[in-house]
Amino acid sequence: MAAKKSAKQASAKRPAGPSAKDVAKAAADARRGNTDVALAALRGYADLGSAAAAAAAAEILAFRGEWEEAATRATELLAQPDAVYSANIFEGCAAIVRRAAEVLDRPRLVQAAAERVPTKLASVRDAVLLRDWFRVREETREPRPEALAEALALAPTLRRFKGKPASELDRHCFSLAVAFDVDEQIVRRWDVRNEALGFEQAIEAARAFARRGEPERAWDAVASRTWWPIENTQVAPVELVTDYLLHPVMTAGRCEKILARPRGAPA
């Protein structure tokens, strides 16, 4: 009886895990630019078992170049993917682990993380953790300028653009240039003045500039737009520091600028 009482007392003293609201609040603090305060809170929540908090902390740590801990925190989410709703967070954490393994020259980090991914996500694990999705994407790019020219000629005749602002047609044409992998047209159709071109389009423009060896223009594209998260535990656009085309553009100072800048509320 005494042993049972002791165990019960110990359980009562054990700190309760953080609520989803706690984690969301800390992530919101991070998006407001209160990075140090948010990171301290997220680390604490992760230590209490919140994989969602661990993922958010991993994003900040990746931007700060603290790859050892970033990989550890990202792996916590990979082991408990149901802690978040969006597959983007799983993919981002997988990319963080891969980048950490590269920076630290410790390829075993990838395999160790893969071993903790639930079996039900084996296909996703193989697609975004056990291979470099960014490089695979680039290797399979096939510019199709002729097909793009046909699509661009057709675009102004589409009924859905009748009576709509020209900026919407311009965004459609930009998206066509991306879909058909024609960097010349991506660069030509990137217009910082067109507010219909958001962060997603800025990232594609930045990739095109990076492929052309124009890192300053790549940064200018990224810096011109505000990132919005898909889920309220996301804190930063991880592809900037994990995509092999983009991370060379992201100096430590630029990474801190992204973290310090207020970012969008949940979409």
Image (cartoon, rainbow, N blue to C red):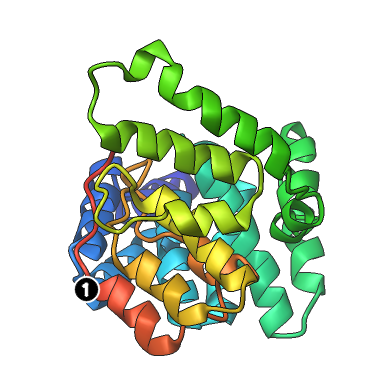
Looking at the image, residue 65 sits to the left or right of residue 148; the answer is left
Q: Position of residue 223 (x, y in %)?
A: 32, 69
Assign the C terminus to one quadrant of the image: top left
**Residue at which label 1 appears:** 37
- Rendering quarter of residue 46: bottom left
- Rendering quarter of residue 135: bottom right
Q: Position of residue 34 (x, y in %)?
A: 19, 71
Residue 94 visible in rendering:
yes
Residue 6 visible in rendering:
no
Q: Residue at x 22, y 46 (%)?
A: 265
Q: Residue at x 63, y 60 (%)?
A: 95
In the image, residue 258 above or below residue 254: above
Q: Residue at x 49, y 67 (%)?
A: 240
In the image, residue 18 above or below residue 242: above
Q: Residue at x 27, y 57 (%)?
A: 226
Looking at the image, residue 90 sits to the left or right of residue 63; the answer is right
In the image, residue 39 above or below residue 5: below
Which of 5 and 135 lies nearest the eye of the viewer?
135
